[in-house]
Amino acid sequence: MKKVLCLVFGGLVMASCGPSTPDGRIQKNPEMFARLSEKDQELVRQGVLAKGMHQDAVLLAWGAPSLRFEGYKDGKASERWDYTGSQPVYTSSFYGGYGGYGGRYGGRYGGYGFAPTVTYIPYCKSRVWFANHRVDAWERVH
């Protein structure tokens, strides 16, 4: 029984970690997709944005943004969506020293060497600007 539960739980975890695609978002939000124009529906399926698209179309095409900013520009309410990612940076660092007492037999421990380190640096992958809930502009990292 424990093995079955572990397998089911593992499968659910793996399924939730899968990449989000426009098709998957459309399947989760069929009513939202049905309200879009035929042109916007086709663009959403391709994961492409166009000026004038509604925020719902962007949500289906690119997914939920990492950050949302609200503001006011040119006499209109505006909004900006940022999509972020992270990039690994690999470094090697020196460690060493002579520790105190401890370990299995209560002896002294210590050592020196080089160790690899991975740090993840956030960056902005893309931005979308909206005016009156419609795409006004966007940019994406190449």
Image: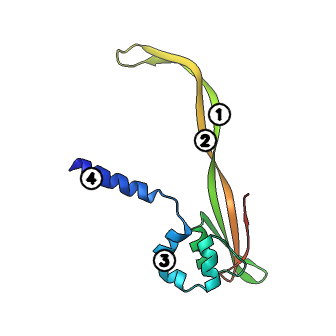
Give the number of the disc on residue 29. Answer: 3
Q: CA distance from mark 1 to mark 4?
A: 39 Å
Q: Position of residue 125 (x, y in %)?
A: 67, 59
What residue is disc 1 on? 91
Image position of 18 (left or right of 75): left
What residue is disc 4 on? 5
Tag 1's secondary structure? strand
The quarter of the picture where residue 135 lies is bottom right
**Label 1 with label 2: CB-CB less than 8 Å:** yes
Q: CA distance from mark 4 to mark 2?
A: 34 Å
Q: Nearer the viewer's eye, disc 1 or disc 4?
A: 4
Q: Amino acid at mark 2?
A: Thr
Q: CA distance from mark 4 to mark 3?
A: 30 Å
* Residue plotted at (50% across, 69% down): 24
* Residue plotted at (64% across, 76% down): 43
Q: Nearer the viewer's eye, disc 4 or disc 2?
A: 4
**Label 1 with label 4: CB-CB less than 8 Å:** no
Label 1 vs 2, first from the N-terminus? 1
Residue 55 seen in the current view: no
Q: Quadrant of the C terminus?
A: bottom right
Q: Position of residue 52 (x, y in %)?
A: 70, 82
